[in-house]
Image: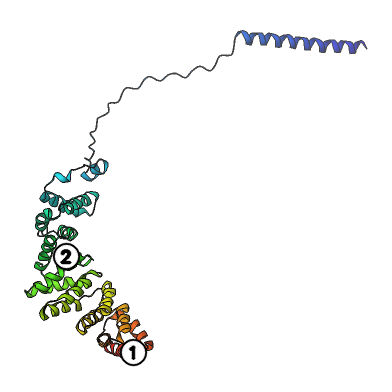
Amino acid sequence: MEAGLGKRAQIAGTALVLLVFAALLRARCARDPVASSPPAETAAPAEPVPVQAVAVSFPEPSVAEEESVAPVQMNFQAVAAADLCRRLAQQIRAGESPETIALAAELVRRGDGAVDALERTLRSGERRAEIAALRLLVRIGTPRALAAGLVRLCQEPASDAQNDLRKVFGSADSRPVAEAVADMAAREERPDERRNLRAVVAALEGAAIVEVLAERIRTAENEEDFRTWLDLLAGVARPSNVPALESVLLDDSRAAAQEAAAAALAGIGDGRACRALADFGAAIPACREALARVRSPYAEAALREIAAADPDAGVRAAAQQALAGRE
Protein backbone atom coordinates (compact mmCIF):
# COMPACT_ATOMS: atom_id res chain seq x y z
CA MET A 1 0.00 0.00 0.00
CA GLU A 2 2.81 2.32 0.82
CA ALA A 3 4.31 1.51 -2.62
CA GLY A 4 1.08 2.65 -4.32
CA LEU A 5 1.00 5.93 -2.43
CA GLY A 6 4.58 6.64 -3.42
CA LYS A 7 3.87 6.08 -7.10
CA ARG A 8 0.88 8.45 -7.06
CA ALA A 9 2.97 11.12 -5.36
CA GLN A 10 5.63 10.75 -8.05
CA ILE A 11 3.06 11.22 -10.88
CA ALA A 12 1.56 14.28 -9.18
CA GLY A 13 5.00 15.81 -8.81
CA THR A 14 5.81 15.28 -12.45
CA ALA A 15 2.53 16.88 -13.52
CA LEU A 16 3.16 19.86 -11.28
CA VAL A 17 6.61 20.39 -12.82
CA LEU A 18 5.12 20.28 -16.33
CA LEU A 19 2.46 22.83 -15.41
CA VAL A 20 5.07 25.21 -14.02
CA PHE A 21 7.22 24.82 -17.14
CA ALA A 22 4.26 25.52 -19.41
CA ALA A 23 3.37 28.66 -17.43
CA LEU A 24 6.95 29.94 -17.69
CA LEU A 25 6.99 29.28 -21.46
CA ARG A 26 3.76 31.23 -22.01
CA ALA A 27 5.06 34.14 -20.02
CA ARG A 28 8.27 34.30 -22.06
CA CYS A 29 6.38 34.16 -25.37
CA ALA A 30 4.18 37.04 -24.25
CA ARG A 31 7.24 39.12 -23.27
CA ASP A 32 9.45 38.26 -26.33
CA PRO A 33 7.21 37.57 -29.40
CA VAL A 34 8.64 35.40 -32.10
CA ALA A 35 10.38 37.59 -34.68
CA SER A 36 9.11 37.41 -38.24
CA SER A 37 11.36 36.16 -40.95
CA PRO A 38 13.98 38.74 -41.82
CA PRO A 39 13.16 40.56 -45.07
CA ALA A 40 15.05 39.54 -48.12
CA GLU A 41 17.95 41.70 -49.00
CA THR A 42 16.91 44.58 -51.23
CA ALA A 43 18.57 44.42 -54.60
CA ALA A 44 20.58 47.40 -55.64
CA PRO A 45 18.59 49.74 -57.89
CA ALA A 46 19.17 49.01 -61.59
CA GLU A 47 20.85 51.57 -63.77
CA PRO A 48 18.25 53.38 -65.98
CA VAL A 49 18.31 52.19 -69.59
CA PRO A 50 18.01 54.98 -72.13
CA VAL A 51 14.99 54.62 -74.46
CA GLN A 52 15.23 56.01 -77.98
CA ALA A 53 12.15 57.99 -79.03
CA VAL A 54 10.57 56.75 -82.26
CA ALA A 55 8.43 59.08 -84.33
CA VAL A 56 5.19 57.41 -85.45
CA SER A 57 3.32 59.07 -88.30
CA PHE A 58 -0.45 58.75 -88.36
CA PRO A 59 -2.29 59.09 -91.73
CA GLU A 60 -4.25 62.24 -92.31
CA PRO A 61 -8.03 61.62 -92.31
CA SER A 62 -9.44 61.29 -95.81
CA VAL A 63 -11.97 63.73 -97.17
CA ALA A 64 -14.66 61.07 -97.00
CA GLU A 65 -13.88 60.42 -93.31
CA GLU A 66 -13.94 64.13 -92.48
CA GLU A 67 -17.24 64.64 -94.29
CA SER A 68 -18.78 61.61 -92.58
CA VAL A 69 -17.86 63.07 -89.21
CA ALA A 70 -18.79 66.66 -89.89
CA PRO A 71 -20.36 67.23 -93.31
CA VAL A 72 -19.85 70.68 -94.70
CA GLN A 73 -23.15 72.43 -95.19
CA MET A 74 -23.24 74.52 -98.35
CA ASN A 75 -25.75 77.13 -99.34
CA PHE A 76 -26.34 75.81 -102.85
CA GLN A 77 -28.79 78.60 -103.62
CA ALA A 78 -25.87 81.04 -103.64
CA VAL A 79 -23.82 78.94 -106.10
CA ALA A 80 -23.88 79.49 -109.86
CA ALA A 81 -25.55 76.76 -111.92
CA ALA A 82 -22.30 76.06 -113.78
CA ASP A 83 -20.49 75.48 -110.48
CA LEU A 84 -23.30 73.24 -109.25
CA CYS A 85 -22.99 71.14 -112.41
CA ARG A 86 -19.21 70.88 -112.04
CA ARG A 87 -19.58 69.77 -108.43
CA LEU A 88 -22.28 67.29 -109.39
CA ALA A 89 -20.05 65.83 -112.12
CA GLN A 90 -17.26 65.36 -109.56
CA GLN A 91 -19.41 63.86 -106.83
CA ILE A 92 -21.45 61.56 -109.07
CA ARG A 93 -18.35 59.50 -109.86
CA ALA A 94 -18.67 57.90 -106.43
CA GLY A 95 -22.40 57.27 -106.84
CA GLU A 96 -25.45 58.87 -105.32
CA SER A 97 -25.02 60.61 -101.99
CA PRO A 98 -26.87 63.19 -99.87
CA GLU A 99 -24.82 65.88 -101.58
CA THR A 100 -25.62 64.76 -105.12
CA ILE A 101 -29.31 64.60 -104.19
CA ALA A 102 -29.16 68.14 -102.82
CA LEU A 103 -27.32 69.39 -105.89
CA ALA A 104 -29.86 67.78 -108.20
CA ALA A 105 -32.78 69.21 -106.25
CA GLU A 106 -31.34 72.72 -106.47
CA LEU A 107 -30.75 72.45 -110.24
CA VAL A 108 -34.30 71.19 -110.80
CA ARG A 109 -35.63 74.02 -108.64
CA ARG A 110 -33.98 76.55 -110.95
CA GLY A 111 -35.78 75.12 -113.97
CA ASP A 112 -34.84 76.79 -117.25
CA GLY A 113 -32.20 78.79 -115.38
CA ALA A 114 -30.11 75.62 -115.12
CA VAL A 115 -30.61 74.39 -118.70
CA ASP A 116 -27.53 76.02 -120.23
CA ALA A 117 -25.21 74.59 -117.57
CA LEU A 118 -26.81 71.15 -117.82
CA GLU A 119 -26.54 71.26 -121.59
CA ARG A 120 -22.79 71.87 -121.30
CA THR A 121 -22.55 68.94 -118.87
CA LEU A 122 -24.29 66.80 -121.49
CA ARG A 123 -21.24 67.32 -123.68
CA SER A 124 -18.61 66.74 -120.99
CA GLY A 125 -17.64 63.30 -122.26
CA GLU A 126 -18.17 61.75 -118.81
CA ARG A 127 -20.91 59.14 -119.08
CA ARG A 128 -22.13 59.36 -115.49
CA ALA A 129 -22.28 63.14 -115.59
CA GLU A 130 -24.07 63.18 -118.95
CA ILE A 131 -26.72 60.72 -117.80
CA ALA A 132 -27.22 62.68 -114.57
CA ALA A 133 -27.61 65.92 -116.52
CA LEU A 134 -30.13 64.34 -118.92
CA ARG A 135 -32.17 63.00 -116.01
CA LEU A 136 -32.32 66.49 -114.54
CA LEU A 137 -33.44 68.01 -117.85
CA VAL A 138 -36.23 65.41 -118.01
CA ARG A 139 -37.20 66.21 -114.41
CA ILE A 140 -37.28 69.93 -115.17
CA GLY A 141 -39.64 68.99 -117.99
CA THR A 142 -40.03 72.38 -119.68
CA PRO A 143 -40.03 72.50 -123.50
CA ARG A 144 -36.60 74.13 -123.44
CA ALA A 145 -35.13 71.51 -121.10
CA LEU A 146 -36.59 68.57 -123.03
CA ALA A 147 -35.49 70.01 -126.36
CA ALA A 148 -31.92 70.33 -125.06
CA GLY A 149 -31.93 66.70 -123.98
CA LEU A 150 -33.43 65.43 -127.21
CA VAL A 151 -31.02 67.40 -129.39
CA ARG A 152 -28.11 65.89 -127.48
CA LEU A 153 -29.58 62.40 -127.87
CA CYS A 154 -30.03 62.84 -131.60
CA GLN A 155 -26.41 63.90 -131.98
CA GLU A 156 -25.07 60.78 -130.25
CA PRO A 157 -24.09 58.09 -132.77
CA ALA A 158 -25.48 54.60 -132.36
CA SER A 159 -23.62 53.16 -129.38
CA ASP A 160 -24.01 52.00 -125.80
CA ALA A 161 -23.86 55.65 -124.79
CA GLN A 162 -26.86 56.43 -126.98
CA ASN A 163 -28.76 53.49 -125.49
CA ASP A 164 -28.04 54.74 -121.97
CA LEU A 165 -29.26 58.22 -122.85
CA ARG A 166 -32.36 56.83 -124.55
CA LYS A 167 -33.25 54.84 -121.44
CA VAL A 168 -33.42 58.06 -119.45
CA PHE A 169 -36.29 59.22 -121.65
CA GLY A 170 -37.81 55.76 -121.86
CA SER A 171 -38.29 55.52 -118.10
CA ALA A 172 -40.24 58.81 -117.96
CA ASP A 173 -43.99 58.10 -118.16
CA SER A 174 -44.69 61.81 -118.39
CA ARG A 175 -47.12 63.76 -120.55
CA PRO A 176 -44.69 66.67 -121.20
CA VAL A 177 -41.93 64.26 -122.17
CA ALA A 178 -44.26 62.29 -124.45
CA GLU A 179 -45.48 65.46 -126.16
CA ALA A 180 -41.96 66.79 -126.70
CA VAL A 181 -40.65 63.50 -128.09
CA ALA A 182 -43.66 62.90 -130.35
CA ASP A 183 -43.70 66.43 -131.76
CA MET A 184 -39.96 66.44 -132.47
CA ALA A 185 -40.14 62.98 -134.05
CA ALA A 186 -42.99 64.10 -136.30
CA ARG A 187 -41.21 67.28 -137.43
CA GLU A 188 -37.67 65.96 -137.87
CA GLU A 189 -36.64 65.55 -141.52
CA ARG A 190 -33.00 64.48 -141.17
CA PRO A 191 -32.90 60.68 -141.49
CA ASP A 192 -30.48 59.90 -138.65
CA GLU A 193 -32.12 62.27 -136.19
CA ARG A 194 -35.60 61.07 -137.18
CA ARG A 195 -34.53 57.46 -136.61
CA ASN A 196 -33.14 58.33 -133.18
CA LEU A 197 -36.31 60.16 -132.17
CA ARG A 198 -38.53 57.32 -133.31
CA ALA A 199 -36.42 54.95 -131.25
CA VAL A 200 -37.11 57.17 -128.24
CA VAL A 201 -40.85 57.03 -129.00
CA ALA A 202 -40.64 53.23 -129.09
CA ALA A 203 -38.78 53.18 -125.76
CA LEU A 204 -41.23 55.36 -123.81
CA GLU A 205 -42.97 53.49 -121.00
CA GLY A 206 -46.57 53.77 -119.92
CA ALA A 207 -49.78 55.30 -121.19
CA ALA A 208 -48.63 58.87 -121.80
CA ILE A 209 -47.03 58.35 -125.21
CA VAL A 210 -50.00 56.32 -126.51
CA GLU A 211 -52.48 58.91 -125.25
CA VAL A 212 -50.53 61.76 -126.86
CA LEU A 213 -50.32 59.96 -130.21
CA ALA A 214 -54.01 58.98 -130.12
CA GLU A 215 -54.89 62.62 -129.50
CA ARG A 216 -52.66 63.78 -132.37
CA ILE A 217 -54.35 61.21 -134.65
CA ARG A 218 -57.81 62.50 -133.71
CA THR A 219 -56.88 66.14 -134.28
CA ALA A 220 -54.66 65.78 -137.38
CA GLU A 221 -55.48 68.51 -139.88
CA ASN A 222 -54.25 66.79 -143.01
CA GLU A 223 -53.53 63.34 -144.38
CA GLU A 224 -49.76 63.74 -144.13
CA ASP A 225 -49.85 64.51 -140.41
CA PHE A 226 -52.42 61.77 -139.88
CA ARG A 227 -50.10 59.17 -141.46
CA THR A 228 -47.10 60.44 -139.49
CA TRP A 229 -48.92 60.02 -136.18
CA LEU A 230 -50.18 56.57 -137.21
CA ASP A 231 -46.63 55.44 -138.01
CA LEU A 232 -45.42 56.63 -134.62
CA LEU A 233 -48.28 54.84 -132.84
CA ALA A 234 -47.54 51.61 -134.67
CA GLY A 235 -43.95 51.82 -133.43
CA VAL A 236 -44.56 51.98 -129.65
CA ALA A 237 -43.04 48.84 -128.23
CA ARG A 238 -43.21 48.60 -124.43
CA PRO A 239 -45.40 46.08 -122.57
CA SER A 240 -46.54 48.94 -120.33
CA ASN A 241 -48.15 50.53 -123.43
CA VAL A 242 -50.65 47.65 -123.85
CA PRO A 243 -53.57 48.97 -121.71
CA ALA A 244 -53.53 52.34 -123.51
CA LEU A 245 -53.40 50.58 -126.91
CA GLU A 246 -56.49 48.59 -125.90
CA SER A 247 -58.18 51.91 -125.17
CA VAL A 248 -57.36 53.10 -128.69
CA LEU A 249 -59.07 50.00 -130.12
CA LEU A 250 -62.12 50.76 -127.99
CA ASP A 251 -62.29 54.50 -128.60
CA ASP A 252 -61.32 54.99 -132.24
CA SER A 253 -63.38 53.08 -134.79
CA ARG A 254 -61.41 54.26 -137.82
CA ALA A 255 -59.72 51.37 -139.58
CA ALA A 256 -56.39 53.19 -139.88
CA ALA A 257 -56.17 53.90 -136.14
CA GLN A 258 -57.12 50.32 -135.31
CA GLU A 259 -54.49 48.99 -137.72
CA ALA A 260 -51.81 51.12 -136.05
CA ALA A 261 -52.79 50.03 -132.54
CA ALA A 262 -52.96 46.37 -133.60
CA ALA A 263 -49.53 46.62 -135.25
CA ALA A 264 -48.06 48.00 -132.03
CA LEU A 265 -49.59 45.13 -130.03
CA ALA A 266 -48.17 42.58 -132.47
CA GLY A 267 -44.75 44.21 -132.18
CA ILE A 268 -44.87 44.01 -128.39
CA GLY A 269 -45.95 40.40 -128.73
CA ASP A 270 -46.08 39.29 -125.10
CA GLY A 271 -48.91 37.22 -123.63
CA ARG A 272 -51.05 40.21 -122.68
CA ALA A 273 -50.69 41.82 -126.11
CA CYS A 274 -51.69 38.56 -127.82
CA ARG A 275 -54.76 38.18 -125.61
CA ALA A 276 -55.76 41.76 -126.38
CA LEU A 277 -55.56 41.04 -130.10
CA ALA A 278 -57.61 37.88 -129.60
CA ASP A 279 -60.24 39.71 -127.52
CA PHE A 280 -60.76 42.30 -130.27
CA GLY A 281 -60.09 39.88 -133.14
CA ALA A 282 -63.66 38.71 -133.60
CA ALA A 283 -64.86 42.28 -134.28
CA ILE A 284 -61.75 43.94 -135.75
CA PRO A 285 -60.12 42.25 -138.74
CA ALA A 286 -56.90 44.24 -138.20
CA CYS A 287 -56.43 42.50 -134.85
CA ARG A 288 -56.74 39.03 -136.36
CA GLU A 289 -54.23 39.95 -139.06
CA ALA A 290 -51.83 41.38 -136.50
CA LEU A 291 -52.16 38.29 -134.29
CA ALA A 292 -51.08 36.11 -137.23
CA ARG A 293 -47.89 38.20 -137.54
CA VAL A 294 -46.72 37.77 -133.92
CA ARG A 295 -43.24 36.26 -133.74
CA SER A 296 -42.14 37.04 -130.18
CA PRO A 297 -40.67 34.13 -128.20
CA TYR A 298 -42.70 35.37 -125.22
CA ALA A 299 -45.96 34.70 -127.06
CA GLU A 300 -45.89 30.93 -127.43
CA ALA A 301 -47.94 30.00 -124.35
CA ALA A 302 -50.62 32.60 -125.09
CA LEU A 303 -50.77 31.66 -128.79
CA ARG A 304 -51.21 27.96 -127.99
CA GLU A 305 -53.99 28.78 -125.54
CA ILE A 306 -55.75 31.01 -128.09
CA ALA A 307 -55.32 28.48 -130.89
CA ALA A 308 -56.88 25.76 -128.75
CA ALA A 309 -59.68 27.54 -126.95
CA ASP A 310 -60.70 30.88 -128.45
CA PRO A 311 -64.40 30.84 -129.37
CA ASP A 312 -63.82 32.59 -132.70
CA ALA A 313 -62.61 30.39 -135.54
CA GLY A 314 -60.84 33.28 -137.28
CA VAL A 315 -58.90 34.13 -134.13
CA ARG A 316 -57.92 30.49 -133.63
CA ALA A 317 -56.70 30.33 -137.21
CA ALA A 318 -54.64 33.52 -136.73
CA ALA A 319 -52.99 32.08 -133.61
CA GLN A 320 -52.22 28.82 -135.45
CA GLN A 321 -50.69 30.82 -138.30
CA ALA A 322 -48.50 32.73 -135.83
CA LEU A 323 -47.31 29.46 -134.27
CA ALA A 324 -46.53 28.01 -137.67
CA GLY A 325 -44.53 31.10 -138.58
CA ARG A 326 -42.38 30.74 -135.49
CA GLU A 327 -41.30 27.16 -136.32
- Rendering coords of residue 151 (x, y %): 10, 65
The part of the image, by quadrant, that contains residue 120 is bottom left
Q: Is residue 194 visible?
A: yes
- Can you say whether 159 is above or below 323 in the image? above
Q: Is residue 265 above or below residue 66?
A: below
Report the residue marked by disc 1.
316
Q: Disc 1 vs disc 2: which is toward the camera?
A: 1
Circle 1 SS class: helix
Real-space Cα separation, disc 1 to disc 2, in angstroms: 41 Å
Q: Position of residue 320 (x, y in %)?
A: 31, 90
Label 2 sits on a secondary structure element that is helix
| Residue depicted at x 48% and y 18% | 39
Residue 164 visible from this viewpoint: no
For residue 163, above or below residue 37: below
**Residue at horizontal 21 percent and vertical 81 percent from the top:** 257
Q: Badge 2 is on which residue?
A: 165
**Left or right of 30 on screen, residue 213:** left
Query: Quarter of the image holding residue 290?
Result: bottom left
Q: Residues within 10 Å of mark 1 (few under 14, many from 20)?
A: many
Given residues 157 and 16, the one toward you in this image is: 157
- Residue type at mark 1 is Arg
Q: Residue furthest right?
A: 1
**N-terminal-most mark, 1 or 2:** 2
Foreground: 208 or 309? 208
Q: Is residue 55 left or right of 123 when viewed as pictured?
A: right
Checking the image for residue 4, the label placed there is none
Q: Position of residue 295 (x, y in %)?
A: 26, 83
Left or right of 85, for residue 99: right
Q: Position of residue 307 (x, y in %)?
A: 35, 88
